[in-house]
Amino acid sequence: MADIDEKRIRKLVKVLANYSSILIEFGIKDQIIKTFKFEKPLTSIEIVSEENDKIKQFMKEMEEFFFIGNTDYETDSQFSSLVFVSRFKNLLDVAISYTSMHNSVLDKFADLSGILTGYSPKEVAEYCSEERLKKYNLIK
């Protein structure tokens, strides 16, 4: 069975608690823990912060638990990073590749990013059918 050691989960929870100032997206800590427990294949974390060093330290600490990758960009005076965590290397590689190819605009590959992050095909289809995404022809 894959490693979902309770001791490591408790350690992960403690590490995540140290980054509350940058992990502000609703429910993101729970999503990260679900990814660790293999309940989700991958989690994307959008971090917008002036604390560039803290973002880098967060990613370094996550390497103990996950394969991790990111794309960075700057907006005004803030540093932004789209961080992906997964316990599956190839899923992470695909997510990073597509993110880089589309300049961190997830809408252009919302079908793939939705499936990679654990949404059902029906949820992905409903999301991709939204008016703003129709221009990308992501579903037939």
Image (cartoon, rainbow, N blue to C red):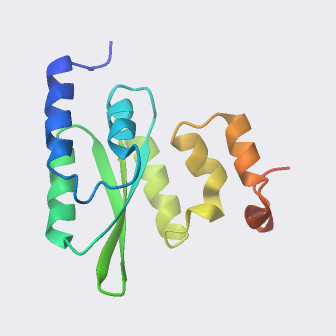
Is residue 63 visible from the viewing direction of this image?
no
> At x 32% / y 18%, what residue is drawn?
2
Farthest bottom residue in view: 76
> At x 27% / y 20%, what residue is drawn?
4
Is residue 139 visible from the viewing direction of this image?
yes
- Residue 16 shown left or right of residue 1 in the figure: left
- Residue 37 shown left or right of residue 133 in the figure: left
Between 97 and 99, the one nearer to me in the picture: 99
Q: Position of residue 100 (x, y in %)?
A: 47, 68
Q: Is residue 72 above or below residue 113?
A: below
> At x 59% / y 41%, what residue is drawn?
115
Q: Position of residue 33 (x, y in %)?
A: 32, 33
Q: Position of residue 6 (x, y in %)?
A: 20, 18
Q: Is residue 71 above or below residue 13?
A: below
Q: Position of residue 41 (x, y in %)?
A: 45, 35
- Residue 20 shown left or right of residue 90 in the figure: left
Quadrant of the rendering where the N terminus is positioned: top left
Between 136 and 89, the one nearer to me in the picture: 136
Farthest top residue in view: 1
Which quadrant holds residue 77?
bottom left
